[in-house]
Amino acid sequence: MTTAVDLRAPLARYASLLHGPAGATHHVASPLGAWLLAALCAPVGSAELEEALGVDLASAQAVASALLDDPHPAVLSAAALWLAGPPTSATDAWLAALPTTVTTGPMPSQSLADAWADEHTLGLIKKMPLTLTPDTVLLLATALATKVSWVQPFTLAPSSRLGAASPWRGAVSQVLEMPGRGHEAFIVRVPALGDVAVHTAYAAEGLRVTSVIGPSGAEAVSVLGAAYEIAVAAATRGSLDRRSLFDLPLGEGPAWTLTEEPVQTAAGGGREEVHRVVLPAWSAESKHDLDRPELGIPAAATGAKRALGTPGARHSAAQSAMARYSRVGFEAAAVSSMAVAVGFPIPQDGLRRTAEVRFDRPYAVVAVADRPWQDGWQPNTSEGSAWLGLPVFSAWVSEPGEALS
């Protein structure tokens, strides 16, 4: 069976595709939630879907089952497939191939579908990202959610600690400062970007949230890609080109100031290295269009329509996501859904608003499933859980929030 180790590289590629259209705007997403949505269509899938998923259809089906049937204690996960109308032999076969924990049944009302989203995201997302119509014949959804507390909460510091050149300094009055334990910080060399700064906060429930800030002017997609690699490598003890502070020049760096002073120290070779980190609290809510060929959802919908016997039906797909990073913990949720309808949409008058948001010194955030700090969770498989080391949520933070006590 394909394990989480096999999925990490395809998921990182999938994440770059999902985050891409948002660019440098403040946003959050769950590439894993969208990937799972497509993977649940593997039993009715095609070569096109397989290419988008990055693994063969049988492996995608196995990974989806491993993740949903053996949930991680820090990540609430759920999926549902609802159908309207008489079943077909193809839909019966599809239902039989789904993970055992997937909810199935007749098409719900909008209020019941919204209630499902609310229940399976710990109340963080109140509504399904799609609106059902009387001619909706299929609704497929996945939900991922987490609410965790840091092993050690941040302390608070004045926003002046961000530096005189940061416009965020005037946007908030307080920021978060890394405490003495339960956190990690280092500088790492990334071939495509150069030196980047990394901070990871650990949650007792088994989630590690890694923030990565790249050089000024670096593209969001590049820093997010580096953040995925760094977060996974750090979680799985992979290879990282960590930089000694004694190999870096004194003075101003891309995202730090390096100073040197004489001290009495027991550090090896008389070289003591200390990392101090300040970063803003933040929150984000986003909605993503999943109906893009590179994400595999249109191919998944084609397979679903074929199983339903309605090849001419229309489909839609979207994800609603949110996250909040605070002094005491982290919470995030995403609902991804795909609907197939047999009618035709009725045009209506409406408004469109497009906002382009630009912030100085943005950074990427990736939340990775890890082993809980407290005992009690034992994966169901002898090989370990497919969740371990797997990124669950990711964000591009370009808008600071006020750090509250």
Image: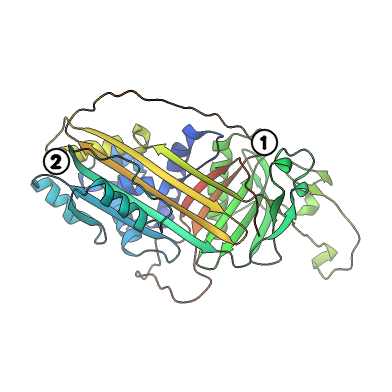
Q: Residues within 10 Å of mark 1 (few under 14, many from 20)?
A: few
Is residue 47 visible to us here?
Answer: no
Q: Is residue 302 above or below residue 283?
A: above
Q: Is residue 187 left or right of residue 117?
A: right
Of mark 2 and mark 1, the one earlier in the sequence is 2
Q: Is residue 71 left or right of residue 150?
A: left
* Nearer to us: label 2 or label 1: 1
Quarter of the figure with the N terminus: bottom left
Q: Which residue is mark 2?
A: 308
Q: Is residue 2 left or right of residue 41?
A: right
State the image coordinates of residue 385 (x, y, percent, origin top left): 40, 65
Q: Residues within 10 Å of mark 2 (few under 14, many from 20)?
A: many
Q: Amino acid at mark 2?
A: Leu
Q: Which residue is mark 1?
A: 360
Q: How is the image coloured?
A: rainbow
Q: Quadrant of residue 139?
A: top left
Q: Quadrant of residue 67?
A: bottom left
Which residue corresponds to the image point at 50% horizontal and 63% vertical from the top-left?
Answer: 370
